[in-house]
């Protein structure tokens, strides 16, 4: 029972941090749209440490998308991208942590541009959005996530 409570608490904490960091990005207009730099995406490294980070990231993304006024398509499919990225990070990244960020980067680069294309009615913009979303994901998941991973790994010992 104690372990389940700890896992639920971790998942809730990750979800809450995701929402807070998304709001921080939103203050600068970078949480959604063509140019995205969600600080919360750095948390996508957490499935390397805890399986319960998967639902934590998904719930955090759903809540963040709802609370920042995203379109329903983004709430559903943007959150699905975060969920799929977290699952990939957990299953593959645990064996090869350096590959962990590839999954949330790829999931968001493929799914989010299609959502934005639909929401904004810009059918010719997929490749442009793939590049802009990809740059933000590489910066947040790849660079900030790697820094968070290294720092957390030191503390975890």
Image (cartoon, rainbow, N blue to C red):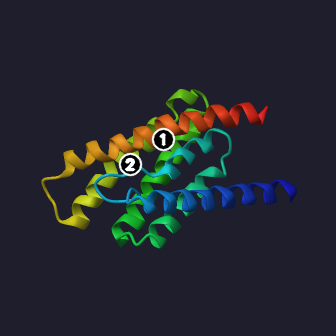
Up/down of 45 relative to 35, above or below: above
Q: Position of residue 99 (x, y in %)?
A: 50, 30
Count of numbered circles in the view? 2
Comparing 22 with 50, the one in front is 22
Q: Residues within 10 Å of mark 1 (few under 14, many from 20)?
A: many
* Residue in view at x 52 percent, y 39 percent: 144
The quarter in which the C terminus is drawn is top right
Q: Residues within 10 Å of mark 2 (few under 14, many from 20)?
A: many
* Residue in view at x 62 percent, y 35 percent: 149
- Location of residue 90 (image quadrant): top right
Q: Position of residue 94 (x, y in %)?
A: 61, 33
Q: Position of residue 116 (x, y in %)?
A: 27, 60
* Residue in view at x 57 percent, y 47 percent: 43
Sequence-earlier tag: 2 or 1: 2
Q: Residue furthest right?
A: 2
Q: In this rendering, which labeled residue sits more in front, label 2 or label 1?
A: 1
Determine contact: label 2, label 1, CB under 8 Å: yes
Secondary structure of residue under mark 2: helix
Q: Which mark is residue 108?
A: 2
Relative horizontal placement of residue 130, taking residue 94 as reference (left or right) = left
Comparing 96 with 30, the one in front is 30
Secondary structure of residue under mark 1: helix
Up/down of 40 relative to 88, above or below: below
Q: Which mark is residue 50?
A: none
Q: CA distance from mark 2 to mark 1?
A: 10 Å
Q: Position of residue 153 (x, y in %)?
A: 70, 33
Comparing 16 with 123, the one in front is 16
Q: Which residue is mark 1?
A: 141
The quarter in which the N terminus is drawn is bottom right
- Location of residue 74 (image quadrant): bottom left
């Amino acid at each position: 029972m104690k372990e389940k409570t700890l896992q639920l608490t971790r998942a809730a904490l990750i979800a809450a941090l995701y929402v807070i960091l998304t709001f921080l990005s939103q203050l600068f207009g970078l949480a959604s749209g063509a140019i995205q730099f969600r600080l919360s995406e750095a948390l996508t490294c957490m499935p390397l440490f805890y399986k319960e980070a998967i639902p934590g990231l998904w719930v955090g993304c759903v809540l963040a998308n709802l609370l920042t006024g995203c379109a329903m398509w983004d709430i559903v499919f943007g959150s699905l991208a975060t969920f799929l990225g977290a699952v990939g990070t957990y299953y593959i990244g645990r064996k090869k942590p350096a590959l962990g960020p590839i999954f949330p980067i790829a999931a968001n680069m493929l799914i989010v541009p299609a959502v934005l294309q639909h929401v904004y009615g810009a059918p010719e913009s997929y490749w442009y959005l793939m590049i802009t979303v990809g740059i933000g994901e590489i910066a947040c998941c790849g660079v900030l996530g790697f820094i968070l991973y290294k720092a957390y790994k030191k503390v975890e010992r």
